[in-house]
Image: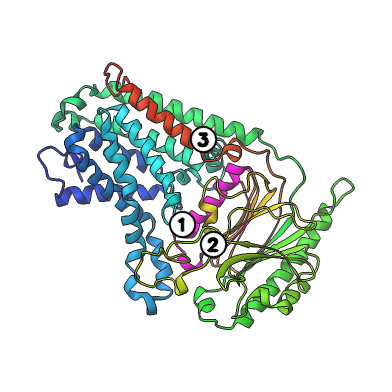
């Protein structure tokens, strides 16, 4: 791939070499996502794509070219970033072998317009900074719109690329407490596009060989001047971002009462065993044994934490999503519930992921809260269903999801259980929806997320899912405990620090005392309104700049 090959001058949009180049840029962009976190690649990919947009000049004739370029870039990005979806079909390859290529490619086709539209709209303003601002803002708005596609599919937000494991990532993602993950996406795309494009257009090869349009020639400048400005603005922005993140990381402190001692049970049951109903009794005994071991550890920890000034902490254990085995439903198995709680003596509650049947005979993916006597104290039904996995759009002619899928619940809730701090239940990928995981009128003190990522294998999928858990903790300032069947189970505090985890593919228990929540964050109070306003402000600046005297890109 060469820089000049991305010029539209005297070339057809259907040139195979250009297809491969733009698809390749999109695919490379996916390397910035978890678990690779190759953030510098964004300067290269968005820099070249921004340069491509800046070489287009006329909205009335070139918007189709921009749209095609955006669609190809988006297809490459999503097809690569969502490759792991194929694993879910491979588990049932004997039934759905014909569907194996479609999950990642199909999702990429559906999501490609979320890049094509911003690319086309960017031509509404002249080439230069205004166009790059418009592209960045509309990219973020289109990214946010994925909440409304089918039942919602917000995987692979670029803001998640900042959640690098360890202290570096903890500092980088602190601004999410103010602007949310979509705010991180906006600033990351802005930074990558502006700095990357400035650098690309300062390259001698482009200045000597690239034929540019009249509207783009006004912002070209010398190599040295553009790179100097790039360094000044880039270093200044990074310094400010890190300073703000460090300040919050060091000054935000939890307040109020501490959370419970959570016992997270990771059974590591292969999905083929669950689907095939292989040895449900053995699975049940495995979970009972692990839970009993975890409760004993929790009791020892509970005794050590109890003082004259610190009251006795409650103990809660978590089983993953759909962890209750066998054909019987947990709601119809009082004996099974009694056995579970008998083996968990000392726990004030047990959270069990299981399928249930409602009064209308519809099946739901649910989380049960069991009281010490085995009675059902509360039930939460998953509200965000996985498209084509738990939920099938009515216009799809083929029956992909058995029985048409599951019924959805009403949305975020806060449980107020006896002797347990207020908790917000979340099932599976509900945790990826920024700003939509808590009841804002009844803020919980901690969050319980149960999931089953065995469907996606030992791939990028579970790591991307885990990154969303960490970001939600920072956005809301609330500690979160995550129980995953095959991993990765983890606990995060309100700053996104990992307090403990169980690796992928390991059987075991994790016992962690939850700290208090942080004071309600700005994002926790206003949610998606904040990144939406930031996008609107960026759009205003982009259109306002079109009325200003033209300057070079480096000096603008």
What residue appears at the point 47 percent right and 39 percent down from the top-left corner? 184
Q: Which mark is residue 530?
A: 3
- Camera-side residue: 151 or 501? 151
Please indicate, yes or no, whether residue 397 appears anywhere in the rendered image.
yes
Vertical order, 437 against 120 (above or below):
below
Magenta-colored stretch includes residue 556 = no
Which badge, 3 or 2, is on the more N-terminal residue?
2
Magenta-colored stretch includes residue 466 = yes
Q: Which mark is residue 151?
A: 1
Tell me residue 95's x, y (percent).
38, 78
Q: Nearer the viewer, mark 1 or mark 3?
A: 1
Q: Which mark is residue 408?
A: 2
**Which element carries disc 2, helix, strand or loop?**
loop
Q: Nearer the viewer, mark 3 or mark 2?
A: 2
Specify the quadrant of the image occupied by residue 211.
top left
Tell me how far mark 1 sits from mark 3, CA to CA. 23 Å
Q: Is residue 304 left or right of residue 145?
A: right
Which region is colored magenta? 448-477
The reply to whether the C-beta atoms of the residues labelled 2 and 1 are less than 8 Å apart is yes
Which badge, 2 or 1, is on the more N-terminal residue?
1
**Which element carries disc 3, helix, strand or loop?**
helix
Residue, far left: 10
Q: Is residue 246 left or right of residue 19?
A: right
Q: Is residue 159 left or right of residue 350?
A: left
What residue appears at the point 53 percent right and 43 percent down from the top-left corner? 169
Vertical order, 544 against 351 (above or below):
above
What residue appears at the point 27 percent right and 27 percent down from the top-left corner? 128
Tell me residue 253's x, y (percent).
69, 37
**Which element carries disc 1, helix, strand or loop?**
loop
């Amino acid at each position: 791939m060469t820089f000049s090959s991305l010029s539209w001058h005297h070339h057809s949009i259907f040139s195979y070499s250009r297809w491969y180049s733009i698809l390749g840029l999109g695919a490379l962009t996916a390397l910035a996502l978890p678990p690779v976190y190759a953030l510098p690649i964004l300067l290269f990919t968005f820099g070249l794509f921004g340069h491509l947009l800046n070489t287009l000049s006329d909205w009335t004739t070139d918007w189709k070219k921009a749209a095609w370029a955006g669609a190809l870039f988006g297809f490459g990005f999503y097809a690569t970033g969502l490759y792991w979806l194929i694993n879910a079909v491979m588990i049932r390859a004997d039934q759905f072998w014909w569907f194996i290529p479609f999950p990642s490619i199909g999702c990429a086709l559906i999501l490609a317009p979320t890049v094509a539209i911003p690319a086309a709209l960017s031509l509404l303003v002249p080439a230069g900074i205004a166009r790059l601002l418009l592209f960045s803002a509309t990219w973020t708005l289109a990214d946010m719109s994925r909440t409304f596609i089918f039942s919602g599919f917000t995987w692979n937000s670029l803001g998640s690329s900042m959640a690098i494991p360890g202290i570096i990532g903890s500092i980088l993602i602190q601004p999410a407490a103010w602007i949310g993950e979509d705010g991180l996406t906006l600033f990351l795309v802005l930074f990558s596009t502006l700095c990357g494009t400035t650098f690309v257009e300062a390259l001698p090869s482009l200045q000597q060989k690239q034929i540019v349009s009249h509207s783009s020639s006004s912002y070209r400048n010398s190599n040295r001047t553009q790179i100097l400005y790039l360094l000044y603005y880039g270093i200044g922005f990074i310094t400010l971002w890190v300073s703000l993140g460090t300040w919050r990381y060091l000054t935000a402190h939890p307040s109020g009462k501490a959370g419970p001692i959570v016992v997270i049970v990771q059974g590591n049951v292969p999905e083929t065993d669950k689907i095939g109903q292989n040895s449900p009794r053995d699975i049940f005994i495995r979970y009972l044994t692990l839970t009993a071991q975890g409760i004993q550890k929790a009791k020892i920890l509970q005794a050590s934490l109890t003082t004259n000034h610190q009251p006795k902490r409650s103990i809660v254990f978590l089983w993953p999503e759909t962890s209750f085995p066998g054909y019987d439903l947990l709601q119809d198995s009082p004996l099974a519930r009694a056995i579970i709680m008998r083996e968990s003596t000392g726990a004030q509650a047990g959270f069990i992921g299981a399928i249930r049947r409602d009064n209308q005979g519809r099946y739901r993916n649910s989380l049960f809260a069991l009281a010490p006597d085995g009675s059902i104290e509360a039930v939460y039904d998953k509200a965000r269903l996985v498209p084509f996995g738990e939920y099938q759009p009515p216009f799809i002619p083929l029956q992909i999801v058995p029985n048409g899928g599951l019924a959805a619940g009403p949305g975020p809730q806060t449980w107020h259980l006896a002797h347990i701090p207020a908790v917000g239940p979340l099932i599976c990928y509900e945790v990826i929806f920024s700003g939509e995981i808590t009841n804002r009128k009844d803020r919980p003190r901690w969050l319980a997320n149960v999931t089953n990522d065995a469907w996606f294998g030992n791939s990028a999928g579970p790591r991307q899912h885990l990154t969303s858990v960490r970001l939600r903790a920072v956005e809301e300032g609330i500690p979160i405990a995550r129980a995953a069947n095959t991993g990765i189970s983890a606990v995060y505090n309100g700053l996104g620090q990992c307090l403990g985890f169980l690796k992928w593919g390991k059987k075991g228990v994790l016992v962690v005392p939850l700290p208090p929540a942080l004071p309600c964050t700005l994002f926790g109070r206003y949610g998606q309104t904040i990144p939406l306003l930031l996008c609107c402000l960026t759009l205003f600046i982009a259109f306002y700049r079109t009325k200003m005297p033209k300057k070079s890109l480096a000096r603008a």
